[in-house]
Amino acid sequence: MKYEIKQLSVENQKLQIPEITDTIILGDSLEIMRQLPDKSIDIIITSPPYNLLNSTGNGLKKNTHSGKWKNAAIKDGYQDYNDNMPYDQYVAWQRLCVAEMCRLIKDDGAVFYNNKNRVQAGLLQDRGEIVKGFPLRQIITWKRSGAINFNAGYFLPTTEQIYMLCNKNFKLVKGANKYTDVWEITQEMKNPHPAPFPEALIDRIISSVSGQIILDPFGGSGTTAVSAKKFDRNFILIEKSEVYCKMAQKRLEGEEWRK
Ligand SMILES: C[S@@+](CC[C@H](N)C(=O)[O-])C[C@H]1O[C@@H](n2cnc3c(N)ncnc32)[C@H](O)[C@@H]1O
């Protein structure tokens, strides 16, 4: 099966879902989402950049090529995105993105928004700030099997959050609530993208919901799309880096993509 990468103009174009179903869109997440109709998407699963290079610590600053974490891929940041915004600007941007996601889901739809609390300048940055005021129903704790930490002032954080924002008619499929709200799933190790989802995490979400059209507006290497196809669903990916779009395309088409 072949999957197209579409580069779309951003000038007030109104996009219809059938024309972009099972498509990788090369573009800016917010600009593309703004062109999609209200209540047109069943499920959104996404992980935005975490603003990791905006660090007060000593480890994740760009061009840190030495020390204990020299092999952590994320330290170099993304291909075409500088993950380093002033904190308030990052929160404001992410709130605009979440607002668009909530506009896009149907009355029985949900958004699974993954982010990670951080400590900066000695104080917790609670990512709950981003989803405040949106229809938050549950916070799933994703427990990874390890993590990186540059600071002796706090315990090694090993969890991330998945905020489940639901419209009123959203329901899990029968039996899915057995998974509980703490998911122990090992992070992805074999994907060259700097911050990929583990496929098992997305498999669990998609197998727990019944929606057909699944959007990931920060698509990266295409894990959400791969999982969607596994469960006979349709996907729409938005990703601003052409390198990652091509990675996702090759992965979906079953070609060598890990280089
Ligand atoms: C945490 S990664 C997502 C990884 C993905 N979940 C996977 O499994 O590979 C965030 C992605 O957002 C992309 N990105 C950053 N800014 C963007 C924007 N404004 N619009 C679309 N994508 C963006 C980055 O290039 C990066 O691939």
Image (spheres, rainbow, N blue to C red):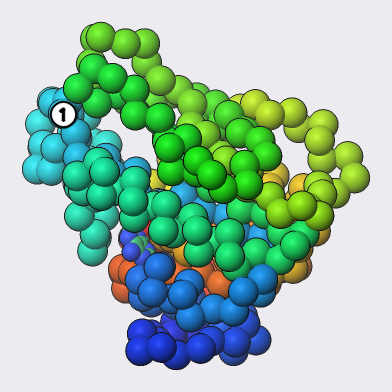
At 25% from the left edge and 9% from the top edge, which residue is drawn?
153
The quadrant the C terminus occupies is bottom left
At 36% from the left edge and 11% from the top edge, which residue is drawn?
155
Tag count:
1
Please name whichever residue, 69 or 236, is drawn nearer the observer in this view of the structure.
Answer: 236
Q: Is residue 58 above or below residue 192?
A: above
In the displayed image of the protein, which residue is found farthest to the right?
174
In the displayed image of the protein, which residue is found farthest to the front?
133
Tell me the kind of residue under disc 1: Thr
Q: Is residue 151 left or right of residue 20?
A: left
At 42% from the left edge and 52% from the top edge, which residue is drawn?
95
Q: Is residue 167 above or below residue 87?
A: below
Q: Is residue 70 above or below residue 153?
A: below
Q: Is residue 79 visible?
A: yes
Q: Is residue 225 left or right of residue 175?
A: left
Q: For residue 140, what is the image quadrant?
A: top right
Please name whichever residue, 112 or 106, is drawn nearer the observer in this view of the structure.
Answer: 106
- Residue 223, how many percent across, how many down? 53, 57
Pointer 1: what residue? Answer: 56
The quadrant the N terminus occupies is bottom right
